């Protein structure tokens, strides 16, 4: 089939004028960090004035996990430094 009325460049451009990608909008948290609106702050864990995410507990858990992982690598005979150099290359 053939298109009966071809859309010219002007009409095509007008239709596509709303399809542009805009930058992310940011809000300022109480702690002063930038955050995405309607999301908890990654720096302090607050949302709408209330602490939602316990940042201290999260960092402690991550430190325990990395320490346990390094211990398992050491026990298996692999060196931690060998793993770090292989990740960089």
Image: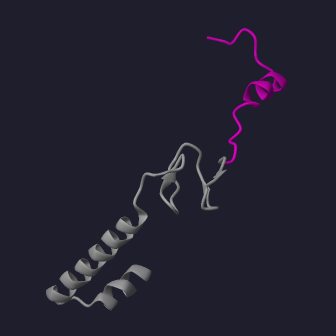
Question: Among all residues in the image, which is located at the extreme top?
Answer: 4
Query: How was the colour assigned to the protein in this rendering?
Result: one colour
Residue 87 image point, x, y percent: 39, 79
Q: In this view of the protein, which residue sits in the foreground, 10 or 60? A: 60
The residue depicted at 18 percent of the width and 81 percent of the height is 72
Residue 13 falls left or right of residue 33: right
The residue depicted at 33 percent of the width and 76 percent of the height is 63
Residue 48 image point, x, y percent: 54, 46
Quarter occupied by residue 71: bottom left
Majority secondary structure in the magenta region: loop
The residue depicted at 43 percent of the width and 51 percent of the height is 52
Write down the region rendered in magenta.
1-23
Residue 3 covered by magenta stretch: yes
Question: Among all residues in the image, which is located at the extreme left?
Answer: 76
Quarter occupied by residue 82: bottom left
Residue 34 visible in the displayed image: yes
Q: Quadrant of the N terminus?
A: top right
Q: Is residue 77 shown above or below 66? A: below
Q: In this view of the protein, which residue sits in the foreground, 20 or 28? A: 28
Residue 65 falls left or right of residue 76: right
The residue depicted at 53 percent of the width and 55 percent of the height is 41
Q: Quadrant of the C terminus?
A: bottom left
Residue 78 image point, x, y percent: 22, 88
Q: In this view of the protein, which residue sits in the foreground, 71 or 27? A: 27
Residue 89 visible in the displayed image: no
């Amino acid at each position: 089939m053939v298109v009966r009325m071809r859309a010219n460049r002007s009409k095509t451009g007008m239709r596509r004028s709303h399809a542009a990608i805009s930058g992310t909008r940011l809000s300022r948290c109480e702690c002063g960090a930038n955050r995405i609106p309607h999301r908890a702050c990654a720096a302090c864990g607050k949302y709408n004035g209330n602490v939602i995410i316990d940042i201290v507990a999260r960092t402690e858990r991550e430190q325990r996990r990395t320490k346990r992982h390094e211990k398992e690598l050491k026990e298996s005979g692999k060196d931690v430094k060998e793993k770090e150099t292989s990740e960089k290359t």
